[in-house]
Each structure stands twice: as C-alpha cells, then as structure tokens.
Amino acid sequence: MSVAEKIMSNEKVHPSIVSIEVGYGSTTLVYSANGKHMNSMTMPSRPKQLGSRSDLTGGLLVTTGKSAVVIVNDNEWQVGTDVGLSSERKSVEVLNDNYIDSDEYLAMFLGCLSLQPHDEIDMLALALPVNRMHLKPKLEAMAKNIKIGQRHIAIRNVWIVSQPFAGLLYHVYESSPETGLRSLINKNFLVIDIGYLTLDWLSINNMRPDEKLSGAIELGMSVLVHEIAEYLGSSKVFDIGEVSPAIINKAFETGSLSMFGKTFNFPIHKSETVSFDASKLIASHMEKAANKITNVIGKGASLDGIVVVGGASGLLLDHIQRRFKHHAVVSYGIDAVGKGLQYGGALKANSGK
C-alpha cells in the first residue's frame, strides 16, 4: 500500500470525506464509502427546474442515471447524471457570473450533498476558479449546517482551494504516491485548468502560489462551443441558424454529432450530402489559450513540471507541449479537480490543522 493509499484509508479520516467541484460546465462529486475513497460521479452543471411532476409516459420510460431533487428558494431542481437526458428548455448549463449566489449553484451543491451517503461529514473539500477565490468566506459560511428536506447534514470542517491547485494535488496523488506533498518542496509547477467558462492557471513556487503568475480569463470551452454552433448552423453547413450548445458538448464527449436523427463524424465529416471541418476552430481556440499562458509564464525555464487538467485537457495538451518542448507536460481529465480535492481533504483531515 502506497503512502497516498495509507493516508486515504487512515481511520482518523475514513469514511466521511466529501469533495464537490461545481464548475461552469460540469460538476464532480467524490466521497469515501464502503472502503473506497474515490467514489465519484461527474454530471452536467445543468440543474433542471421542475414544473409539473406528472409522468407523461405512465412509468414506461425511466431514467437510468443517479439524480436528486432539491428545493432552492421554493423551486424544485433536479440534479444528476441523467438530467441531460431531459428537455433543455428549463435547464441551465452555464452558471451565471454571480456563481455561488445563483440558484443554479446552490441546486448543484445541495444536489451533490444529497447524492452522497454521509449525514456527518468530517471534511468537505470545495474548489473555486482562481478569479473567484474572493468568494471563499461566503462559500464557507454557506457550506455549514445543511438541511435538505428532512435530512440534516452536519459538516465539521470546510476546506476551500482554487481549482488548479486541486488539479496539482491529483497529479501528486497519481505521480508521487510515496512522497506526497514533499514532492513539491523546492519545485516550481504550472497548473492549467481549461474549464467550460474560464481558462485558469496557477503557478506554484516551493508549495506557495505565485499570484503574479496566476490568473483566469473567460477563454474556456463555452467560447469554442459557441463558435462551432454558429459555424454548423450557418449556410455553409446545415443552414438552421445556430446549433444547440448541448449538441456540440455531446459531440465533444462522444466524437459524433447527432442531429436530425443522423450521426455525423466530429469534428470532421465528409459525405455527399453534408461536409464540415470544425477542427480548425478547435485548433485556433487552443492556440489562443496556449498563447495567453506563454505570454504570462514565458519559456518556462524555471518550471519543474506542467500539468493540464479539465475536460478539454486532451485538446490543449499538444499546444502547450509545443511551447514548452523541454518539459514532459502531463494531463488529467474532467474529474481530476474533484479527485484532487478528495486527496487534499484527506491530507488536511489527517494533519488535524
């Protein structure tokens, strides 16, 4: 058993550690239960505001994912992995700029707490974008003494960090399980988190954030999704105005574009009836993101490692690697921040600080 595994299974912190990362595009819930410390589920940040609860199918059609219904300001919201299967009409996919003040954020937050099994949580780990860390005190106050319907959830400790830092913690968990945080001593790391709304980056120097070399801009995947939606809806391709962003998001997930009851290859499709190439838009967006990073960081001679996290990390990786050719840039997927929070939450609880 590695040191990381021993920390995660320590009786002092097992089993009630819960981590929630509510992003603009997706939300990840991680919790410890049944001897496992990285139970996780990732869902769209698309809570569905419920109207009539009547079942128009008479129970014949049922959803297969995990979901919960919570009440926020007298309105019912459904949250979960299967919410994307329901109508988009009353769904909100991109949380507004008020972020934690929004009903959508609170619905996602309460929904995740409802989906995890613990009524007593020793450590609740949460993350915010770099440019939203000023909301930390408000989020911390919101995250205590939670009541969901008749269920009261007691939260003993709340720990909040930036999303890129949680991504770095996951890198430590995966790459240095024996040494843990000691692997960061006297080392400089750059962590890049490409989310749905924002592109965040964090520079860590000897385990301390360098705020001058850290930041966030609204250059996340939503910008690219909108560009592709306009392109595919134009007269050059389908000639329907603009394609739904939800359809583009699904295409990125599956590699296929589903429209009009047909399936098209994505991002490039060629046939007698319709052809399109969205790869140039993708490459252009990732180039803009990589340029922004290098304009701030420079050539990276002082860096010991570069980590890219997020659902689109695989798209950005090559563009970052070309700019930092002397480094072996590593990437982790959409749930890396949530799992990094869980590891960090275990470290924090184990330290007793």
Image (cartoon, helix red, strand yellow):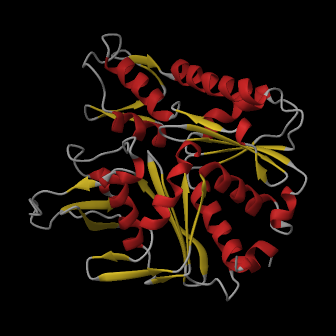
Residue at horizontal 80%, vertical 58%?
175
Above or below residue 236? Residue 80 is below
Quarter occupied by the N terminus: bottom right
Q: Quadrant of the C terminus?
A: bottom right
- Residue visible at 56% across and 24% down in the picture: 285
Horizontal placement of 351 versus 235: left or right? right
Q: Position of residue 217 (x, y in %)?
A: 55, 32
Res 80 visible: no
Q: 224 above or below 61?
A: above
**Residue drawn at (29%, 23%), measured in percent from left and top?**
242
* Residue 309 percent location from the top left of the image: 64, 46
Can you name the residue that lies furthest to the bottom here?
11
How many discs mark residues in the rendered view?
Answer: 0
Q: How far across and how far down the image is residue 125, in percent?
A: 56, 67
Residue 257 placement: quadrant: top left
Foreground of the two, 12 or 90: 12
Left or right: 254 in relation to 200: left
- In the displayed structure, 211 sits above or below 76; it is above
Observer able to see residue 319: yes
For residue 76, side relative to residue 315 (left or right): left
Q: Residue furthest top?
A: 236
The location of residue 107, given as percent across then percent down, is 33, 60
